[in-house]
Image (cartoon, rainbow, N blue to C red):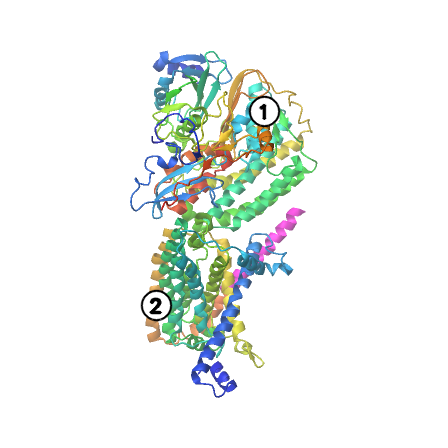
């Protein structure tokens, strides 16, 4: 029985076991869904602001202080919009498709560990479950495209199906490498394997192989979420809006919500598997007195990856369909398969990574590269500010 | 009666008239596009008049086999505003605002071409001061027009950010224009015999300030962020290859033709308005990443042309500083009434060679006929040739690289 | 080559077809008979001395007041190889104006000729796809002709508000809504 189950058992003595178990599963799930459903409000605001700053403009600033209520206003607007049904659209599929897409995005949260015991369900096939459930949204997308009775939507749906299916494989292969090292599919076990601080994170085991695996997984997951540079299913400039062309009002909001939720899901999965999940970089920072800071660390890492995803969206152009397929099948898949095989072999020989090499060189090199990039960005910003002042003189 | 038969338009039907029941005129009935003539696995996809990336109201019918286009048919005329008929009903100076509205993104170039054509017809020579002002305005307009061209091209390819960076600089240029003549987009600036407003005090300093910022920050950032981007190159460098002979036969002009490697620029080869006094390079596509004449090369020509225009502007500003201020309305005639004759004059507008064929009958103050050969019209005519075998994503890349503005195609 | 030598070269080949040559105009032009224009175009493009590989502009002009009243089609030619230009004109009768197409020589003529047909009613024989280009498909008439009258009705709708319409409206008549039927072509008919 999970911790919540025990708590409930204590609170409600005498109730039958099945009720306690059901409640123990239901309450955290509802709380989680509620909490995560509010997430897109934050992410959309972040995206518009980040886009604004990258495009040398400000972004929303009028609705609420610093534009914080902008997304809320957008959500309210979408709720009030008329949900238009195309006359010859397939009614049932048309309505069901966004539900399926949202379902596929939200179901993965069930197994994400927010703390050592703060997890809705510690399935011992956690990774497998996540991968399986995130494919539900593919079905939803195809349904949306077909049911709209619109050639553009159909195009978007077909492209999306091809894209997601192709990128699923490198993503899973890179996860396979991680699972082979840990020896368990359970996400809680994977996090527990990375105890001990930053050098023990799976990103730095068998350095630099897992870094490659992380990059492959991150790229493939960008394609899973239909984010740029892989956003041809919803390529605004080609297909108007791809598979959700015909959706308006709240159905469109559901697709939108599902996309941002999917982003946080893959970021959370990536942080759990590669970046140590709810563990802090230094074990001393794990607890703030009696309060465990697990959720804070997990969200911090996931939000950072979400930020990188948004950053990439506003920088890179879009790949064409065949180029996208090329990247998936001819670039990512060979790398991922080689990685899976090589790490699989290495695990037999060196079960704990390259030992001192990882712990001493892995993380400083990686952090050094990131620090160098960050330094470069800061210097570039300073230079451009300096130049602007110079030119204004 | 199929509409490919060349016959005069039928009589107006009596009684209730339907848009779609007039026999023989429906474009859907043209051979090869009827529903019973396409293959089973083909689909007719309509990139309709309302589309985010067709640069205006352009309708393209595509016959596709999945994602690959087998045939394409553009339909234009949604923005036809009868410019040529209007110009017969207003006097010569009154045509200038109408010319602005053709290529509304680059108005200075349109009115410049018209003014120069009428001046050639009448034999008017403007002073070097006015010529220098005209060059400054035309080249600033060229930069502004190319920001739209390159920026929206990047946006169509998927890179949203360079568009906004370029638009920031376009705003600065538009501010300069507003300061001079009061309008941001449609200026009515180049009059027959002069310009409408003299440059205000401080214009030269502000223009130089803009050029410094543009050359130091925006243009290098553009080359890095968009033109040098590997994904952008992959999307554009193998698409829409135009051989020079094909380009000449279909009258591709301006950066479209220069992208195929042909070094021909009216400002150098048939100079007008004092362009022979300025030192600048003709920017040609080089085919670094694929065959010569691809979409990338045309875009490359445009991107480099922005820097060259900046050079021309600074040279013209230098020349203006040395001249003393003259009266810009000195040579503007009280009544523009050319004697009987006709002229065809072409100038290098940002989108290509803009040609004005003006026929004057010597009586009255209205032109007898003004025919405009707009560069986008001829550029669009090559579309159906290039579109075969491309993906739908490439169709977008192709239209953007031809840099069409529907106002100019439809007039 | 200057205009005179170009004219001579054309006259060598098409002597009797070239009916006039105006060297004193601002841009010298030659008038050629309608049936010879396609051959002249092909010759102008293929001849190595002339090498007119570019058709700069194809315009149509309506001269109803000339004697005889005529429609003119004006071809502005340019050679990128030799950097010279020339103007050819064709005079046509205002009713039933026909002339062969130059589409095979210069691909751009496809659209230019469609526009001339659309706005003037000049028919280009041999054109692959002569239909309206700028005006709607079901437009009646050719507006740029000098004798064009604006129609009062288009598809059953009044085009220009006239004072009589105001009077009729005030008298109670229903104005502005004609008998029309919008049936989109792909409507599913059950």
Extreme residue in the right direction: B201
* Gap between marks 2 and 1 measured at Cα: 76 Å
The answer to whether residue A15 shows anywhere in this view is yes
Q: Chain of mark 1?
A: B
Residue occupying image coordinates x 34% and y 58% = A329
| Residue B136 in the figure: left or right of residue B240 | right
Quarter occupied by residue B401: top left
- Residue A314: x and y in percent read 51, 54
The answer to whether residue C49 shows anywhere in this view is no
Extreme residue in the front direction: C172
Task: Indicate yes or no whether the magenta region holds residue B101.
Answer: no
Please state which of residues A332 and C75 is positioned toward the viewer in this rendering. C75
Specify the label residue A2 is tagged with: none
Q: Chain of mark 2?
A: A
Specify the label residue B90 is tagged with: 1
- Residue B208: x and y in percent read 63, 40
Task: Indicate yes or no whether the magenta region holds residue A381.
Answer: yes
Q: Quick one: SS at disc 2?
A: helix
B147, above or below B117, in the image: below
- Asked whether the residues under marks 2 and 1 belong to the same chain, the reply is no
Q: Residues within 10 Å of mark 2 (few under 14, many from 20)?
A: many
Extreme residue in the bottom direction: A14
Q: Which residue in the protein does label 2 denote? A: A340
Q: Which residues are magenta?
A: A369-393
Contact? badges 2 and 1 (CB < 8 Å): no
B164, above or below A269, in the image: above
Q: Quick one: SS at disc 1?
A: loop
């Amino acid at each position: 029985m999970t911790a919540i189950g025990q708590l409930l058992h204590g609170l409600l003595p005498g109730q039958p076991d099945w009720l306690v178990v059901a409640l123990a599963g239901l309450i955290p799930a509802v709380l989680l869904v509620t909490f995560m459903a509010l997430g897109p409000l934050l992410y959309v605001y972040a995206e518009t602001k980040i886009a604004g700053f990258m495009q040398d403009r400000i972004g929303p600033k009028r609705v609420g202080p610093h534009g914080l209520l902008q997304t809320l206003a957008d959500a309210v607007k979408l709720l009030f919009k008329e949900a238009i049904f195309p006359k010859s659209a397939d009614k049932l599929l048309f309505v069901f498709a966004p539900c399926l897409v949202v379902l596929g995005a939200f179901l993965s949260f069930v197994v994400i560990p927010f703390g050592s015991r703060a997890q809705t369900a510690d399935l011992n096939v956690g990774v497998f479950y996540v991968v399986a459930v995130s494919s539900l949204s593919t079905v939803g997308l195809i349904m949306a495209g077909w049911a709209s009775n619109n050639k553009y939507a159909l195009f978007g749906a077909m492209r999306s199906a091809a894209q997601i299916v192709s990128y699923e494989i490198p993503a899973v292969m890179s996860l396979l490498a991680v699972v082979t090292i840990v020896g368990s599919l359970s996400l809680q076990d994977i996090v527990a394997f990375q105890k001990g601080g930053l050098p023990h994170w799976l990103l730095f085991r068998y350095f630099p192989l897992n870094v490659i695996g992380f990059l492959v997984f991150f790229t493939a997951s960008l394609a899973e979420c239909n984010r740029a540079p892989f956003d041809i299913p919803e390529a605004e400039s080609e297909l108007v809006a791809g598979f959700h062309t015909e959706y308006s009002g709240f159905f469109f909001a559901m697709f939108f919500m599902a996309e941002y939720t999917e982003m946080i899901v893959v970021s959370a999965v990536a942080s759990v598997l590669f970046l140590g999940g709810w563990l802090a970089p230094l074990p001393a920072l794990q607890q703030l007195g009696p309060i465990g800071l697990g959720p804070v660390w997990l969200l911090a890492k996931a939000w950072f990856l979400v930020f990188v995803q948004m950053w990439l969206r506003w920088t890179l152009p879009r790949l064409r369909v065949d180029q996208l397929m090329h990247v998936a099948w001819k670039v990512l898949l060979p790398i991922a398969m080689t990685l899976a095989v090589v790490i699989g072999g290495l695990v037999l020989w060196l079960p704990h990574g390259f030992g001192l090499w990882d712990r001493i060189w892995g993380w400083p090199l990686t952090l050094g590269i990131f620090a160098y990039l960050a330094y470069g960005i800061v210097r570039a910003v300073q230079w451009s500010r300096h130049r602007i002042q110079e030119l204004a003189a | 009666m199929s509409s490919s038969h060349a016959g005069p338009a039928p009589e107006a039907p009596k009684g209730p008239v339907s848009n779609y029941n007039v026999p023989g005129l429906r474009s859907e009935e043209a051979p090869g596009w009827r529903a019973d003539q396409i293959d089973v696995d083909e689909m007719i996809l309509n990139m309709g008049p309302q589309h985010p990336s067709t640069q205006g109201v352009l309708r393209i019918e595509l016959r596709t086999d999945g994602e690959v286009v087998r045939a394409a048919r553009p339909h234009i005329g949604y923005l036809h505003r009868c410019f040529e008929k209007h110009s017969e009903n207003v006097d010569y100076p009154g045509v200038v605002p109408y010319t602005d509205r053709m290529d509304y993104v680059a108005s200075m170039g349109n009115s410049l071409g018209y003014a120069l054509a009428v001046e050639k017809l009448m034999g008017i020579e403007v002073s070097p001061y006015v010529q220098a002002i005209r060059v400054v305005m035309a080249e600033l307009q060229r930069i502004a027009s190319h920001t739209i061209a390159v920026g929206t091209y990047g946006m169509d390819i998927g890179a949203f950010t360079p568009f906004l960076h370029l638009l920031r600089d376009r705003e600065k240029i538009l501010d300069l224009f507003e300061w001079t003549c009061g309008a941001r987009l449609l200026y009515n600036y180049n009059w027959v015999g002069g310009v409408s407003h003299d440059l205000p005090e401080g214009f030269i300093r502000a223009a130089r300030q803009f050029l410094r910022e543009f050359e130091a920050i925006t243009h290098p950032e553009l080359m890095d962020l968009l033109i040098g981007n590997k994904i952008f190159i992959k999307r554009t460098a193998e698409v829409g290859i135009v051989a020079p002979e094909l380009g000449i036969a279909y009258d591709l002009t301006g950066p479209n033709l220069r992208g195929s490697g042909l070094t021909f620029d009216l400002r150098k080869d048939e100079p007008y308005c004092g362009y022979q006094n300025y030192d600048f390079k003709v920017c040609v596509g080089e085919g670094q990443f694929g065959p010569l004449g691809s979409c990338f090369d045309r875009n490359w020509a445009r991107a480099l042309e922005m820097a060259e225009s900046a050079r021309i502007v600074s040279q013209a500003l230098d020349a203006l500083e040395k001249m003393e201020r003259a009266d810009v309305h000195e040579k503007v005639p009280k009544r523009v009434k050319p004697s009987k004759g006709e002229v065809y004059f072409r100038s290098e507008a940002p989108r290509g060679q803009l040609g004005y064929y003006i026929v004057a009958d010597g009586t009255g103050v209205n032109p007898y006929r003004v025919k405009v050969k707009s560069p986008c019209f001829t550029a669009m005519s090559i579309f159906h040739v290039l579109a075969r075998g491309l993906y739908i994503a490439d169709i977008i890349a192709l239209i953007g690289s031809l840099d069409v503005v529907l106002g100019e195609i439809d007039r | 080559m200057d205009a005179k030598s170009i004219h001579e070269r054309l006259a060598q080949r098409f002597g009797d077809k070239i009916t006039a040559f105006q060297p004193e105009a601002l841009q010298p032009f030659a008038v050629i008979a309608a049936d010879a224009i396609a051959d002249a175009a092909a010759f102008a493009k293929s001849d190595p001395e002339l090498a007119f590989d570019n058709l700069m502009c194809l315009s149509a002009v309506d001269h109803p007041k000339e004697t005889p009243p005529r429609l003119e089609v004006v071809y502005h030619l340019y050679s990128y190889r030799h950097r010279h230009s020339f103007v050819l004109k064709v005079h046509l009768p205002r009713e039933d104006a026909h002339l062969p197409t130059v589409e095979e020589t210069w691909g751009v003529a496809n659209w230019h000729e469609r526009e001339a047909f659309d706005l003037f009613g000049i028919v280009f024989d041999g054109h692959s796809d002569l239909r309206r280009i700028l005006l709607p498909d079901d437009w009646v008439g050719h507006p740029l002709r000098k004798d064009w009258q604006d129609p009062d009705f288009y598809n059953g709708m009044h085009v220009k508000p006239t004072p009589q319409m105001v009077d009729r409206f005030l008298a109670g008549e229903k104005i502005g809504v004609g008998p029309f039927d919008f049936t989109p072509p792909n409507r599913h008919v059950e």
